[in-house]
Image (spheres, rainbow, N blue to C red):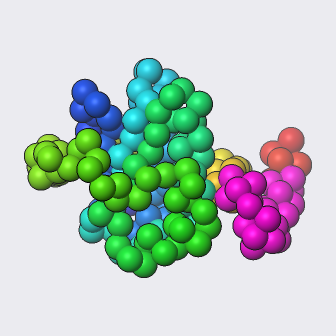
């Protein structure tokens, strides 16, 4: 069974990633993998289309924040297209709007939005099946990385995600010891 819920297309001006279900810990490794390959090849601008995404969890948001930091390091940026009010509120509550432009007015992609979405129609991601392809150790590392990114963004986030990160760090230590 596949948990592919992201499609993507590289255009001349950006990597376009469309989330076609809930943005969550299951599909966030796909988001990271596709974006990391694009950035490694010299790309710098990512647009994440959330038009039909009903919501996002903290792992997905932490992954987005991490990608935004990577893009900024190479002179690029991440933008979000068509976030629902609920998703926008969730992202803003964690401070993602400080790293990511959410539905920016006059965005470079706005004039050909329909064409970009049409280019993705029926095109599954080639990055694997998200969490199902990862070992337990890799899953824990991914979720921890996403939450540490959120935690580092503000004092409020540090308090919110402190216990989660500590628990994940303990799990990671236990899993590493078992693997040795």
Does residue 92 appear in the picture of this structure?
yes
**Residue 81 point in image, percent of width and height:** 32, 57
**Which secondary structure type mostly characterizes the magenta part of the structure?**
helix
**Is residue 85 found left or right of 92 in the rendered image?**
left
**Is residue 177 found left or right of 79 in the rendered image?**
right
Asked if residue 41 is positioned above or below residue 127 in the image, the reply reads: above
Range of magenta residues: 149-174
- Residue lying at 41% horizontally and 26% vertically, measured from the top left: 43
**Residue 141 point in image, percent of width and height:** 70, 50
Asked if the stretch drawn in magenta spans residue 165, the answer is: yes
Name the residue nearer the viewer: 157 or 19: 157
Furthest residue in direction top, as rendered:
42
Furthest residue in direction bottom, as rendered:
86
**Is residue 3 found left or right of 24 in the rendered image?**
left
- Residue lying at 38% horizontally and 77% vertically, measured from the top left: 85
Asked if the stretch drawn in magenta spans residue 154, the answer is: yes
**Is residue 67 found left or right of 154 in the rendered image?**
left
- For residue 88, which quarter of the picture? bottom left
Does residue 136 appear in the picture of this structure?
no
- For residue 62, which quarter of the picture? bottom right
- For residue 16, which quarter of the picture? top left
Give the quarter of the figure containing the C terminus: top right
Give the quarter of the figure containing the N terminus: bottom left
Asked if residue 179 is positioned above or below residue 83 in the image, the reply reads: above
- Residue lying at 68% horizontally and 52% vertically, measured from the top left: 149
How many marks the image carries: the answer is: 0
**Residue 27 point in image, percent of width and height:** 45, 57
- Residue lying at 70% horizontally and 56% vertically, measured from the top left: 153
């Amino acid at each position: 069974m596949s948990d592919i819920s992201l499609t993507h297309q590289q255009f001349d001006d950006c990597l376009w990633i469309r989330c076609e279900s809930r943005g969550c810990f299951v599909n966030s490794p796909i988001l990271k993998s596709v974006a990391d390959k694009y950035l490694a090849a010299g790309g710098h601008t990512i647009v994440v289309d959330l038009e039909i995404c009903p919501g996002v969890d903290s792992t997905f948001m932490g992954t987005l924040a991490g990608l935004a930091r990577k893009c900024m390091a190479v002179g690029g940026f991440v933008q979000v297209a068509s976030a629902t009010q609920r998703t926008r509120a969730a992202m803003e509550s964690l401070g993602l709007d400080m790293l990511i432009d959410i539905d920016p007015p006059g965005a470079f992609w706005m004039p050909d939005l329909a064409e970009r979405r049409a280019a993705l129609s029926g095109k599954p991601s080639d990055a694997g099946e998200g969490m199902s392809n990862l070992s337990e150790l890799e899953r824990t590392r991914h979720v921890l990385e996403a939450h540490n990114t959120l935690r580092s963004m503000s004092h409020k986030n540090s308090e919110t995600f402190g216990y989660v990160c500590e628990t994940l760090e303990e799990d990671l230590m236990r899993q590493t010891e078992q693997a040795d």
